[in-house]
Amino acid sequence: MKTIFSLTLTLFTGYIFACNNPHFGLALNQRSFYNPAALCPYCVGSTFMSGGSSFIPGAKNISGFNYAFGNDADNFIHGPWDLSYSQMKTPEIKMSAYSMRYAYSMQIGNWKAAIGMRGSRYTIKGNGDAQFSTKLFDADAGIMATNQKGMYFGMSMLHLGSPSRTIRNESGITYSVSLPQTFNVIGGYVQKISPAWDVLPDVSFLSNKMENVFIPGAMIRFKHHYSLGGGMTFASNEKASYQIRAGYMSSKFKFLASACPSPQGWTIETGITWRFWFTQDCDGGTCTVVKPWKKVDDFIRHR
């Protein structure tokens, strides 16, 4: 008689990123992957391409990446949108997702706010001895507000449906896969010190049924471009750890990286955002960018 084994795999999106950082949470990075309502906190928005990766040098099957293309400026659909692809890999599973998000934005005094949704189609496969494959569909929701001069805050709930599925492979082994609801909060601002120097503090918090993670951090920036700083990670199921951050920032291009010690080695995380179709630079303190889509919007509205 064939013996039936069972294995439960609970997956959560913060698992493999630097120091449990749940949203590629480097200051100024494009973070729509973890908040569907994400706006640019430091500019009026633009067309953008972004990407992020996380890995441990020398470690096998511990990595992840995310790529997105979209527009978060004022446009004729009244809000930011993007299309993205992500992949996460651990020794047990490989998970990939195609996603689409839209957020309705509105002006509230000197602030801009947005409420957004994202739908994702996940493909989850077993690695190593775990031989299985399944597909899931899920949705995320979030809200965000910013003065577009550096101050922002937002919250989101990932995996609203908390989908789960039990799979039985050809060997008679059953696997239970689930994506638990995960609550995220983010916030930050720019504190100017002098015409050449400023500081960018930020905080983030993640909570799901597996852990709670709190990450405060800050980077000091020279001439609005060159940045260096760090952060701390306080997790309910791990001891506190530190994080080193550095990068180059501008209104059109950002490259940010972090490094954090972990039991498997140093976890390296990188993030790149390329913004284009700007007509004027914005330094994160004064934003007077002429909106490139305005003429298109006016044309559509008056037809």
Image (spheres, rainbow, N blue to C red):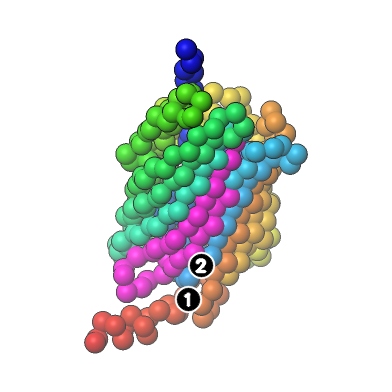
- Residue 232 at x, y = what percent? 60, 36
**Residue most toward the right?**
58
- Magenta span contains residue 84: yes
Residue 244 in view here? no
- Magenta span contains residue 75: yes
Q: Are marks 2 and 1 in contact (CB under 8 Å)?
A: no
* Residue drawn at x 49%, y 64% as measured from the top left: 69
Of residue 80 and residue 205, the one placed in the foreground of this image is: 80
Of residue 217 and residue 110, the one placed in the foreground of this image is: 217
Q: Is residue 110 left or right of residue 88?
A: left
- Residue 179 at x, y = what percent? 42, 35
Pointer 2: residues within 10 angstroms few (<14), some, or many (20+)? many
SS of the residue at dot 2? strand
Quadrant position of residue 168: top left
- Residue 214 at x, y = what percent? 51, 34
In terms of sequence position, does the residue under pointer 2 or pointer 1 come before the other? Answer: 2
Which dot marks residue 289?
A: 1
Which dot marks residue 222?
A: none
Q: Amino acid at mark 1?
A: Val
Up/down of 38 relative to 12, above or below: below
Q: Is residue 140 left or right of residue 12?
A: left
Distance between mark 2 and mark 1 Cα atoms: 15 Å
* Residue drawn at x 38%, y 33% as measured from the top left: 165
- Residue 196 at x, y = what percent? 66, 64
Q: Which residue is mark 2?
A: 48
Name the quarter where the C terminus is drawn. bottom left
Residue 54 in view here? yes
Magenta-drawn stretch, dominant element (helix, strand or loop)? strand
* Residue drawn at x 51%, y 47% as measured from the top left: 96
**Magenta span of residues:** 65-90
